[in-house]
């Protein structure tokens, strides 16, 4: 597994500070992106938390996930949470070291009382003394929140006094991309009131052994609660590795409701799901991969979009129109960019491989963030995508007459890819027989899709990259005006 060193640089450690004006939660920021460009220590907010105790507990839950490995827990992990300011809210995100749990805390406008919320993305320092201080935050005392240092502090410090270097595996980067694709297929499956939510979550196992985390449960809505079921019956939601919801225990005394999200039609095998605790002015969500021993990075949900010829140029166009929106409107983006909604979604998926797009199941909408990764890095490291491109380059794909069947010659054997009018595909290979598309398309399906896109582009008079040879003046003007 390839990885690189990721460096955080902070002016000082984050801390809970006591002063004449009361207690202050100072979250120090590392280098990040803002509307004005890169910033060493961006400042996003200064004001008060409307509900200090729930906010402190929820921040600890996000930090718990960042420091945890739910599979092979003996291996330590630590990645400082990502914070994004979207103008009307602040989001804190983290991934577990095993890449199987994604945590996000959305502190909404109702949970903040202060100056304007900025725009941008950075990392925030979460250290052990801060964690201990957050556990002592009481519900009655006011708590001032500062995300980032003020201008005076930035100019008076000679340089970073706190530096961290952590290994950053490629699979964590791919995990950010896969979770937004996965969550975009979720529907709200159940909502429990506070008392039932607490009862259900407290009844889950808290153990953490390697074998225990392989447990897969199914639950089905029953009145105001959830009852277990032994199989994925209609309406059921998968709970893979229920021990992985342990971080939610921190916020149970503040919970107002529990919302559960999952795919609308469960398959025969485990699926991902999202578990959202509604807090005063906040939402804390944990999204679980389908298997505790398998992180999000290998799910393959982004491959179809990455394989499309138009994805890269469309992504460049769409990226120029984003501005840390808390809700990305697909139809509005399609109109502005002059492309179809389907191409916008594919472009957003590609941008997601660079960490620029997330998905909020509670609002059924994408949101913009800006992580310091590039889409090509995730694409070049994906073995199925590389294998598919090699098959196309070798001329191994042959489209049969009628278009519903294609053959792919691999060494001395042939795989057949079949598609129907509804867009459903299948392949005769062992990968497809094992996963049935549950972990994304196989290399043969990807290769056939690439050849079909190329054939369609040739019929429509488009360039090899998928961009029309004669781009309209409106598109050119839009590109220039957004640079």
Image (cartoon, grey):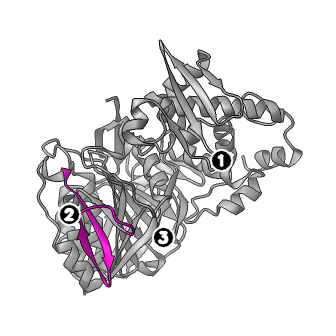
Residue 470 visible, this orientation: yes
Mark before the other along the chain sequence, 1 or 2: 2
Q: How many marks?
A: 3
Dividing the picture into quadrants, the one containing residue 189 is bottom left
Above or below — where is 90 with respect to 13? Answer: below
Q: Secondary structure at mark 2?
A: helix
Report which residue position mark 3 lands on: 89
Question: 10 Å neighbourhood of mark 2: few (<14), some, or many (≥20)?
Answer: some
In front of the other: 425 or 91: 425
Which residue extends farthest front?
A: 401
| Residue at figure coordinates x 40%, y 36% from the top left | 433
| Residue 219 among magenta residues | yes
Q: Quadrant of the N terminus?
A: top left
Q: Secondary structure at mark 1?
A: loop
Q: How far is disc 1 from disc 2 in space, using C-alphas? A: 44 Å
Please state the horizontal and vertical placement of residue 50, each as a whole percent of the image: 37, 82
């Amino acid at each position: 597994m390839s990885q690189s060193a990721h460096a955080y640089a902070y002016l000082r450690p984050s801390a809970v500070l006591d002063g004449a004006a009361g207690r202050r939660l100072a979250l120090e920021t590392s280098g990040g992106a803002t509307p004005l460009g890169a910033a060493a220590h961006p400042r996003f907010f200064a004001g008060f938390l409307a509900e200090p105790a729930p906010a402190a507990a929820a921040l600890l839950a996000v930090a718990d996930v960042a420091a945890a490995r739910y599979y092979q827990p003996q291996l330590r992990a630590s990645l400082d949470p990502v914070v994004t300011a979207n103008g009307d809210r602040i989001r804190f995100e983290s991934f577990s070291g095993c890449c199987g749990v994604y945590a996000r805390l959305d502190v909404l406008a109702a949970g903040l009382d202060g100056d304007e919320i900025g725009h941008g993305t950075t990392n925030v320092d979460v250290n052990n003394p801060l964690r201990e201080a957050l556990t002592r935050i009481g519900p009655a005392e006011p708590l001032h929140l500062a995300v980032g240092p003020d201008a005076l502090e930035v100019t008076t410090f000679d340089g970073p006094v706190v530096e961290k270097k952590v290994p950053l595996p490629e699979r964590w980067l791919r995990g950010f991309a896969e979770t937004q694709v996965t969550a975009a297929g979720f529907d709200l499956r159940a909502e429990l009131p506070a008392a039932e939510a607490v009862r259900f979550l407290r009844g889950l196992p808290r153990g953490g052994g390697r074998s225990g985390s392989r447990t897969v449960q199914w639950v089905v809505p029953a009145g105001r609660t959830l009852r277990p079921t032994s199989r994925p019956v209609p309406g059921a939601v998968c709970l893979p590795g229920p021990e992985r919801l342990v971080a939610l225990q921190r916020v149970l005394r503040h919970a107002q409701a529990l919302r559960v999200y999952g795919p609308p039609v469960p398959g025969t095998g485990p699926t991902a799901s999202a578990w959202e605790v509604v807090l005063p002015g906040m939402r804390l969500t944990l999204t679980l991969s389908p298997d505790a021993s398998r992180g999000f990075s290998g799910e393959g949900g982004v491959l179809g979009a990455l394989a499309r010829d138009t994805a890269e140029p469309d992504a460049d166009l769409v990226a120029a129109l984003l501005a840390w929106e808390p809700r990305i409107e697909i139809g509005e983006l399609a109109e502005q960019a002059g492309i179809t909604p389907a191409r916008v979604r594919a472009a957003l998926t590609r941008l997601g491989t660079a960490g620029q797009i997330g998905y909020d199941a509670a609002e059924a909408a994408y949101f913009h963030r800006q992580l310091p990764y590039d889409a090509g890095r995730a694409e070049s490291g994906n073995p199925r995508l590389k294998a598919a491109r090699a098959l196309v380059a070798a001329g191994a794909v042959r489209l049969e007459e009628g278009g519903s069947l294609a053959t792919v010659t691999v060494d001395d054997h042939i795989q057949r890819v079949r598609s129907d009018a509804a867009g459903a595909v299948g392949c005769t290979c062992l990968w497809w027989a094992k996963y049935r598309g549950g972990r994304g398309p196989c290399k043969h399906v990807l290769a056939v899709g690439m050849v079909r896109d190329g054939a369609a582009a040739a019929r429509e008079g488009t360039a090899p990259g998928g961009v029309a040879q004669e781009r309209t003046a409106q598109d050119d003007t839009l590109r220039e005006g957004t640079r």
